[in-house]
Amino acid sequence: MDNKTKLRLGGLAVLATAVLSLIFVLFTDSWPVAILLAVAVMAGVIGGMIWTTRRQQRQFLERLKKFDIDPEKGRVNEANLRRMYHTGGQAQKDAVTIICLSQKCSVEEAHAMMKNRPTRQQMNQMAQQQMKGQRRPHR
């Protein structure tokens, strides 16, 4: 997360704390108690949000490792990604997320890319093109 986003979230938290303290003043009739209560509530909310996002990230990484995808290296085997996609459920959503982030495309385009399986003829043509690029010119 960049500094600009952190600053915005911090400002939003301060604003929410101020509004909460104004609401709590109506019930407690004491400014110091209302401010302390608002700070405690906001600290709990922010802590819960941080815990939830870290938990989701940890679960995402565990789901990737089930399909032999290592996010630390940054390289994803297309066969593993296809296997993950065709499993369905949350794994399919994760595969679409990975494709969208890597290819910078929409969700519909990612689904179309995964549903389109190359035929044997297309695979042979791709292999021939790769072989042409590896051959040395004859002198």
Image: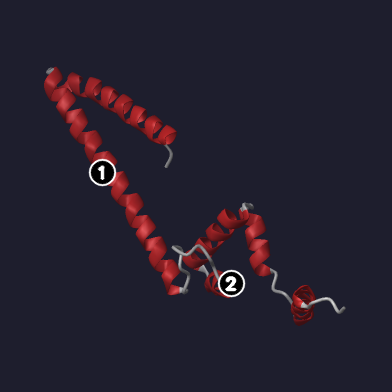
In which quadrant will I find the C terminus?
bottom right
Estimate how packed mark 1 is, as few (under 14), some (14 to 19) or many (20 or more) residues with alpha carbons within 10 Å.
few
Residue extending farthest to the right is 139
Kindly report the distance in space between the C-alpha atoms of the residues bearing marks 2 and 1. Answer: 36 Å
117 and 128: which is toward the camera:
128
Query: Could you tell which of marks 2 and 1 lies nearer the N-terminus?
Result: 1
Estimate how packed mark 2 is, as few (under 14), some (14 to 19) or many (20 or more) residues with alpha carbons within 10 Å.
some
Q: Is residue 17 above or below residue 31?
A: below
Q: Is residue 76 left or right of residue 113?
A: left
Helix, strand or loop status at disc 1: helix
Q: Which residue is mark 1?
A: 47
State the count of labels: 2
Image location of residue 80, percent across then percent down: 54, 74
In which quadrant will I find the N terminus?
top left
Helix, strand or loop status at disc 2: helix
At horizontal 30% and vertical 26% (from top left) the residue drawn is: 14
The kind of residue on which mark 2 rests is Arg
Image location of residue 60, percent across then percent down: 41, 61
At horizontal 40% and vertical 30% (from top left) the residue drawn is: 8
Q: Quadrant of residue 134?
A: bottom right
Q: Quadrant of residue 20?
A: top left
At horizontal 48% and vertical 70% (from top left) the residue drawn is: 69
Q: Is residue 3 above or below residue 94?
A: above
At horizontal 21% and vertical 29% (from top left) the residue drawn is: 38
Residue extending farthest to the front is 139
Judging from the image, the colouring scheme is: secondary structure
Q: Which residue is mark 2?
A: 82
Image location of residue 104, percent across then percent down: 62, 52
The kind of residue on which mark 1 rests is Gly
Q: Is residue 55 left or right of residue 82?
A: left
Q: Is residue 1 left or right of residue 16?
A: right
